[in-house]
Each structure stands twice: as structure tokens, then as C-alpha cells.
Amino acid sequence: MNHWLVKSEPFKYSWEKFNEDGRTFWDGVRNYQARNNLREMKEGDLVLFYHSNEGKNVVGVAKVVKESYQDPTTEDQNWVVVDLSPVEALKNPVSLAQIKAEPSLADISLIRQGRLSVMPLKAEEFDKILEMGS
């Protein structure tokens, strides 16, 4: 199993709306590196859901329920989506400041490539963020 982090601005698509929907396709990715990460996602992979811009917190865990396919919001064949479903909210959201302050998370893409919207995490990084949010 692989682990990931996806970012969404809460005013565009919040954790709360995601839970109401119960499932969504992760669209709007227009960065090649993020697109390649979507292509690597496999059914059953776990994903941290991060509120960007407002809040700047990891707020929950989702899972990949359908692997990459053509983004239905565009005719451009370069872009793909995956389907995600919510698993659980974190008891305590984990802020970007907390993540930056944790030495074991110094190399994650959230810090190194702040604009990347879909990024891989090592299992130990994923687990550390979960631990911080429990």
C-alpha cells in the first residue's frame, strides 16, 4: 500500500462536503507531477486530506476507491482523476506549523514543494501525522 496527501481549499471542496458526498473524483489537477502521482495511486491506498490556504491543516483520512481514469471535466487526455472516499476525520487537525516543527517530517513534499497538490508520503510520515492528530 502507498500513502498520499491531497490538498483542497476548503471553500472549493472541504472535508465536510467530502463527507456529505461520501465519494468524489479528485479533479482539477493541472500539474504534471501531481498528475503522475494520481496515476500511481492504487485502490486501497490511504490519503491524507489537507485544507490548503485557509486552515492549513491535515483534517482527515481518505482511501482510493477507483484508480486513475480520464478527467471528466476536460477533453484534454493529459489529465486524470481518481475516486476517493472518506475514512475518518482526525481527532485533532494537524497544522502546517506542527508538521514543519516535527524533524521526522522535514523532507515531505508539503514542505519542500508547497504548491504540489497531490504528493506521496512514506508510511512512517503518514503514521507520524496520524499520531499527531490522535
Image: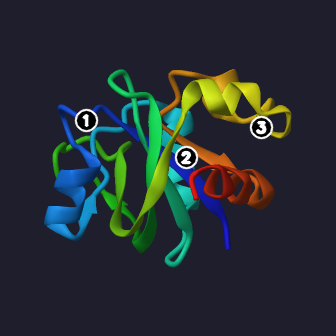
Q: Is residue 49 visible?
A: no
Task: Say left or right for 113 vs 8.
Answer: right
How far is disc 3 from disc 2 in space, using C-alphas?
22 Å
Tell me if I can see residue 9 in this picture. yes
| Callout 3 touching callout 2 (CB < 8 Å) | no
Q: Which label lies toward us, 3 or 2?
A: 3
What residue is pinned by disc 3? 105
Camera-side residue of 88 and 68:
88
* Side of 126 relative to 61 (left or right): right
Residue 63: horizontal and vertical position, in percent? 45, 69
Given the image, on which type of amino acid does mark 2 rest?
Asn
What residue lies at 19% left-to-right and 43% top-to-bottom?
74
Residue 26: x, y in percent?
Answer: 31, 52
Q: Secondary structure at mark 3?
A: helix
Image quadrant occupied by the C terminus = bottom right
Looking at the image, which is closer to me, 59 or 7? 59
Q: Please tell me whether mark 1 or mark 2 is closer to you in this view.
A: 1
Query: What residue is shown at x 47% (from left), y 57% (from top)?
Result: 90
User: What residue is shown at x 21% (from left), y 53% (from top)?
Assistant: 16
| Residue 36 numbered mark, or none | 2
Mark nearer the N terminus (3 vs 2): 2
- Give residue 79's quadrant in the image: top left
Q: The residue under label 1 is which amino acid type? A: Pro
Crowd tier of the residue under label 3, counting other residues whose Cα lies within 10 Å: few below 14, some 14–19, many 20 or above = many
For mark 1, what is the residue? 10
